[in-house]
Amino acid sequence: MKLIVTGGAGFIGSAVIRLLLNTTDNTIINVDKLTYAGNLDSLDSVAQHPNYHFEQVDIIDSDAMSAVFQRYQPDAIMHLAAESHVDRSIDGPAEFMQTNIIGTYNLLETARQYWQTLDAAGKANFRFHHVSTDEVYGSLGENGLFTEDMAYEPNSPYSASKASSDHLVRAWHHTYGLPVVTTNCSNNYGPYQFPEKLIPLMILNAQEGKALPMYGNGQNIRDWLYVDDHARALWLVLREGRLGETYNIGGHNEKTNLDVVHTLCDTLDELLPSSTHKPHRSLVHFVKDRPGHDMRYAIDASKIQQELGWVPEETFETGLRKTIEWYLSHDTWCQRVMDGSYRGERLGLAE
């Protein structure tokens, strides 16, 4: 298979590419604009693989994307390119609308025009896999889970832009017959994640004895999914998912943000016994909450388990330990990331 992965230099995209190049003989075309969160260092281990190709292209550029399709003649596309940080979407929503909505529209049209040129077998085998988020469903109360048939209730500019892109993908399937599958995942964590996100930011701050900023009272709940488990699920859905269907992917790991950070701190105490910042829990600092902060996310992943046989391999505890150990042993990667425009500052104050 020849597979285009958009956003392949990002956190989840790079995990998918590493998985496929290390375990299959497929040809992977990484299409990435290389924004602040795109990091080719995350692909160093496979960059010289004969089946790997990189194209620095913005998905907004229809002509450039058409050229990529014509050059490589792909059998499928896995669309992960997106602006993805809620806090950044609060400060500057315009870029989220452009990339996540207009960019997805451009990709759908480029893919549709290419798909229409294929022979009958090529059309039947082609897939457009759209990768989205559980945040499109809004916020849960104390009980219940997100299921694939729930109404969308996005509450941030980021989630609204992803909800819009999901609807576009559905419309292109029902109107034009484009063979699509969609996945909505819970919060990912693991190696190579950009340190504006909760877990890597807390690891790096705690190492240096910096304050660990906790929004509100820290009781917001998320369902945590180890990125390699997610990558396996995405590859499975691309190959075996039913056309036009949506599959929710979750880690079965509901944790409050405060519990996540406390577990992280306790693990650092163990792994860094000589640290002068112990106990690392003492670094937790409560700050003003994020505007419109959703209270609880939790995914019902029974559909993908029952239909495709996927279950996560990592518990939160095993995945978190692997993640912390990776960051502690990859100072160079972390430093190169932090040498850019992001310095760990608070974003999303809506001021």
Image: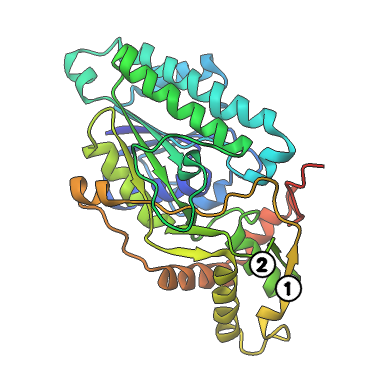
Dot 1 amino acid type:
Glu
Q: Residues within 10 Å of mark 2 (few under 14, many from 20)?
A: some
Q: Secondary structure at mark 1?
A: loop
Q: Residue drawn at (66%, 79%), measured in percent from left and top?
A: 281
Q: Position of residue 165 (x, y in %)?
A: 48, 27
Query: Which amino acid type is shown beneath numbered disc 2?
Result: Leu
Of the pair 340 and 200, the residue shown nearer to us: 200
Which disc is residue 342 wearing? none
Residue 59: x and y in percent read 53, 25
Residue 204: numbered disc: 2
Q: Is residue 86 visible?
A: yes
Tell me where residue 181 appears, x and y as whole percent. 32, 32
Q: Nearer the viewer, residue 75 or 86?
A: 86
> Which residue sits furthest right?
351
Relative to 190, does residue 116 appear above or below in the rendering? Answer: above
The residue lying at 32 percent from left, 12 percent from top is 176
Label ID, residue 208? 1
Q: Is residue 142 left or right of residue 94?
A: left
The reply to whether callout 2 and callout 1 are in contact (CB within 8 Å) is yes
Residue 21 visible? The answer is no
Tell me the residue at 73%/46% (across/down): 348
**Residue 252 screen position, x and y as percent:** 37, 61
Label 2: element kind = helix
> 288 and 280: which one is in front?
288
